[in-house]
Amino acid sequence: MIFEKVDERFRGHLSKKEMQQIELKILKHVVQFCDENNITYFLYGGTLLGAIREKGFIPWDDDIDIAMPRPDYDRFIKTYKNSERYILNSYELDKTYYFPFAKVYDNHTYLDERTTQRIPMGVYIDIFPIDVFDNNKFRYFFNKVKRGLIHTKIATVKKDNSLLINLLIILGRPFTFWIPINRVLKSMEKNVRKIPITKSKKVGTVTEGYISSLPFPYENIATIIDWPFEDLIAKVPQGYDELLTILYGDYMTPPPPKKQKTIHEKFFCGYREGYTE
């Protein structure tokens, strides 16, 4: 569903298939950069699941996720060079950015998700850092609290939310108004850098905070192998079976039709004025 009010410069709502093709081009661009600069990455989350089960996109999925061990993620942020078309966004580069992971987006496109306060961006792929789970419950609890503060600060009240969620957003907003998100993100990252990732038994997207933040053995990602994804040969963890089982359970069995839908909410996306591809 397209939102009621969209900037007139952005016309031509993209279909899910068109979005997938744009995302695939971004992925190819990022993969080439990683290969040329010896940066370790691998398909992650629903994209990894799709690669293993479908050899490409899950049919109803509308995004691409990749992950990198924290040292490689840091190198990617520091060395990636924006082009006219493909732009890297992360909180290290933009103080108004509020995600604890990076995105590379297509600057020829426009995307309005309206699930949180808006960041001007186009169709993108997500890039998650893989960090250490150090079994320090106290430290991990405070990271969860910090994530909650960020979500409360950036979330929007929507009719699709439950009454309780909207009430929490309204009541929590005054307490988070003065919280500097950039400083909170830096604090979260400081907590997960205590132990080198190769010295940890459990790792994951610790700062991200959703289902894919569940811990899994480091051995699952210690070796990376080639795997087909659509018309691209990409990288996946050799231990993908255990990793996907931890994240999704019986991942080779598709969900029932009523659950075959994206986890992302309604948005408008199209090409910017003057661009058609």
Image (cartoon, rainbow, N blue to C red):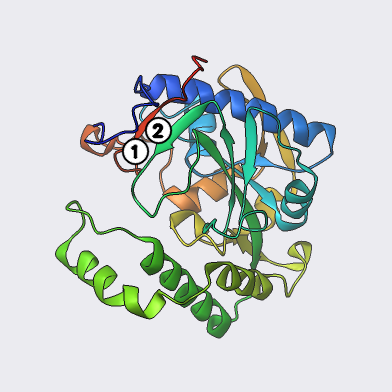
- Farthest front residue? 8
Q: Is residue 226 visible?
A: no
Image height of 25 relative to 255, above or below: above
Name which residue lies at 54% across and 77% down: 140
Question: Helix, strand, or loop for circle 2?
Answer: loop
Relative to 51, is 75 on the left or the right?
right
**Callout 1–callout 2 Cβ contact below 8 Å:** yes
Which of the 4 image quarters holds residue 228?
top right
> Along the line of sight, which residue is nearer the eye, 136 or 36?
36
Tell me which corner region of the image, top left, top right, bottom left or bottom right, holds residue 256.
top left
What's the residue type where badge 2 is placed?
Asp
Seen at 79% across and 32% down, the residue is: 35
Q: Is residue 32 above or below residue 142?
A: above
Label 1 crowd bin: few (<14), some (14–19), many (20+), radius 10 Å: few
> Residue 78: in sight, yes or no?
yes
**Upstream in sequence: badge 1 or badge 2:** 2
Considering the image in quadrants, where does the N terminus appear? Answer: top left
**Residue 61, label in figure:** 2
Q: Residue furthest right?
A: 37
Where is residue 220 shown, x and y percent of the image? 65, 51
The spot of residue 77 in percent (x, y) is: 73, 49
Reading the image, the residue beneath label 1 is 262
Q: Position of residue 189 (x, y in %)?
A: 65, 68
- Looking at the picture, tell me which residue is in the foreground, 54 or 234: 234
**Left or right position of 37 against 21:** right
Residue 210, x across and y down, in percent: 44, 58
What is the C-alpha distance between the residues marked 1 and 2? 5 Å
The amino acid type found where label 1 is placed reads: Thr
Nearest the viewer among 250 and 121 is 121
